[in-house]
Structures are given as C-alpha cells and as structure tokens.
Image (cartoon, rainbow, N blue to C red):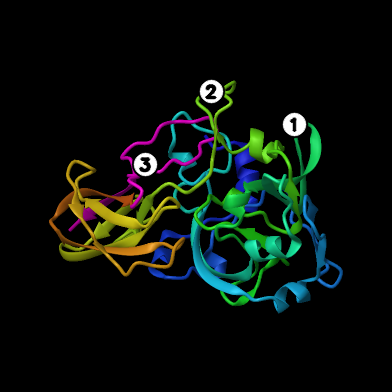
Amino acid sequence: MISQEELQLAARNHGMPLEALRWDVTPVGLHYLLTHYDIPAVDPASWRLEIGGRVERSLSLSLAELRERPAVTRPVTMECAGNGRARLEPHVVSQPWLLEAVGNAEWTGVPVAALLEEAGVAEDAVEILFTGLDRGVEGGEEQAYQRSLTLAEAADGPLLAYAINGEPLPPQHGFPLRLLVPGWYGMTSVKWLARIDAIAEPFAGYQQATGYRIRSHAEDPGTPVTRIMPRALMVPPGIPDFMTRERFVEAGPCELRGRAWSGWGAIEAVEVSVDGAATWAAASLGPEPSPGAWRAWTFAWDAAPGEHELCCRARDAAGNAQPVEAGWNVGGYANTSVQRVPVTVR
C-alpha cells in the first residue's frame, strides 16, 4: 500500500510517460523530476557561484560571467537511482517510481574541468564537493544538499549546466545552475548550485555516506550508488483499456521500439522477449549516440493472436547485462529488472 509519505513525495515529483521514449530529446515538461528538499527562490542578479577550498585562486562568478566562458551542449540521459523501486518486494517506502524516472535532454554549460583548471586545485585535494542552495533536515540536523566526486571523476565530463533543450533551466530543474554528471544516477547532479570546494579528505556528509547506498539490511554500511546500470525500455505498443488495465495489439506485423542506456559503457545489444522472458531475440540498434545519451532500438514482431508478455533487456560494452530479476535492497536503488508489458493480440 502507498503510504502518506509516498503520496506527498509523488505530489512534488513526476515521471516521464513511456510514450516519450519516441523522442530522441525529451521535452522539458515530460522529463522526470525529483526534488529532495525545497525549491529555493534564487535572484539571478545577485546569485554567484563560489569556488574555493584547496585551490590556488578562489573564484566568485556571476551567471553572466559563466555564460561568457566556452560552453558545451550535449545530450545526456538522466535516471533516478530509485527508478523501478515500486516494483520491488517487500515494498520500500520512498518515491514510488515504476519505470518513469528518466529523460534524455540536451544540456548546455561550462565543463567543470575548465573551472577547476582556472582555480588551480591544490596537490593535497582528493575530492570536489558540490553544494546546492536547497536545504532540509536529515537525522535531526538541517543541512544543504551536497555530493562529491573524486578529482578524476570531476574532470571526466561533468558540466555546470545553465540551459536545458536550449532554454534557461526552469526553477524545478535547478535554476540558475546545476551540476550535470553524465552516466551517473541523478542524485549526483546537484541542483541550485552555490559552491564548489576542493577538499583534502573524502566527503562524509549525509547524501554521500548515509543516503544513496546499496544495503542488504539497515545495519549494513553498504556500497555507494554511482553509475547507471544498463536498462532497456520499450514504448508500450497498441492501445490501453484503462478500465481493465489491458493493452490491445492488432495481429500481424508490429514494430516494437524503445531506448537503452548505461553509465558504464556504450550499449552493445538489446534483446526482446514476447513470451515473458522464456526466450529472447536480438533487436536492431539505432545509430550510436554521443556518450551518456540513450540509444534507440527496434524489433520486428509478427504478433500472433493471444496473450503475450513483452520484455526487453540491454547489455553494455563493459559486460554489464540487465537482469531478468533484480535483488532487493533497503533503499530500493538500481532495480533494473526487465520491463514487462502484458498485451492481448486480437
């Protein structure tokens, strides 16, 4: 049963309808959204990004000054670490995502590496800490939302994004500036960014050391949630009957299509099953996208009358394969068990 807490969370957040998998670039209004704490009100005229800590030169930059620097635009698939949580048993109390917590947008901003080079990171720094303006209470203490990356991770592609799909970030997506970390689950991409600090020891704040860890039980210290595990999703075919919750497909040729992505390597294969994961056949892959963006796939199905359960699964270049069933964990993170779409062919 959905709890009152989950209903309140769902009212703040929204997912992407799976029909939006048809678009290479997800429209902003359909892109998934998760807000951890509040949505801060930010005056862009007075806002500044502070860069400090273990650096040779502290920086204080306005939004206009950031926009004057060389910019990069790239499509990136962002997925919530809790995507698929609502499909786990026993039930995990948190944002009850099914499969909709994903989107693929075009982000524009300044590479983190360029600003770190400008500031000059000290030799004793080991991580880069990112602090947002959103605040909340965790463990009885008020705190800002913070995440860190190692020096190597911070230099390997993250952007300080001020635009999405060619438009300024809307408030709910982190206006005026957010971190974007391609290939990592969305909790790493700190919104409403206020500070970047080079630090001399690993960050041990709540969202790093306590939240977002894979735990088998409450006392398990767990392992951190990091890069996105491979996943394939399909556009639900046919038409739905919302009274009976059935989907109907006409008999004969039917093209199944969807998207696949991974934060560990390029998508090398997608397979489709039309018999509930009993047997599998290879799908056709679309053109290889830029790193960090999802890849299109299609499958030609000769739909025979009767009941069918459609499934799809992905494999990446690093050898990670999407499981048919995923293991349970306390936070309900990284559940990439295969999508199942029951249909009636008539």
Q: CA distance from mark 2 to mark 1?
A: 18 Å
Residue in the picture at 63% in, 62% down? 113
Residue bearing the label numbered 3: 337
Q: Amino acid at mark 2?
A: His
Mark toward the start of the polypeptide (3 vs 1): 1
Instruction: Give the quarter of the image for residue 63.
Output: bottom right
Q: Amino acid at mark 3?
A: Ser
Residue in the picture at 77% in, 75% down? 65
Mark toward the start of the polypeptide (2 vs 3): 2
Percent position of residue 38, x then y: 74, 51
Find out whether residue 233 is within the magenta segment: no
What secondary structure predominates along the stretch shown in magenta?
Answer: loop
Question: What residue occupies the far top of the structure in this picture?
Answer: 219
Q: Which span is picked out in magenta?
A: 317-346
Tag on residue 139? 1
Question: What residue occupies the far front of the structure in this picture?
Answer: 123
Label 3's element? loop
Q: Is residue 218 left or right of residue 284?
A: right
Tell me the crowding category of disc 3: few under 14, some 14 to 19, or many 20 or more residues within 10 angstroms, Cα based: many
Tell me the crowding category of disc 2: few under 14, some 14 to 19, or many 20 or more residues within 10 angstroms, Cα based: few
Residue bearing the label numbered 2: 217
Cβ–Cβ under 8 Å for marks 2 and 3: no
Tell me the crowding category of disc 1: few under 14, some 14 to 19, or many 20 or more residues within 10 angstroms, Cα based: few
Q: Amino acid at mark 1?
A: Gly
Q: Is residue 215 left or right of residue 240?
A: right
Position of the C terminus by quadrant: bottom left
Number of marks: 3
Label 1's element? loop
Mark toward the start of the polypeptide (2 vs 1): 1
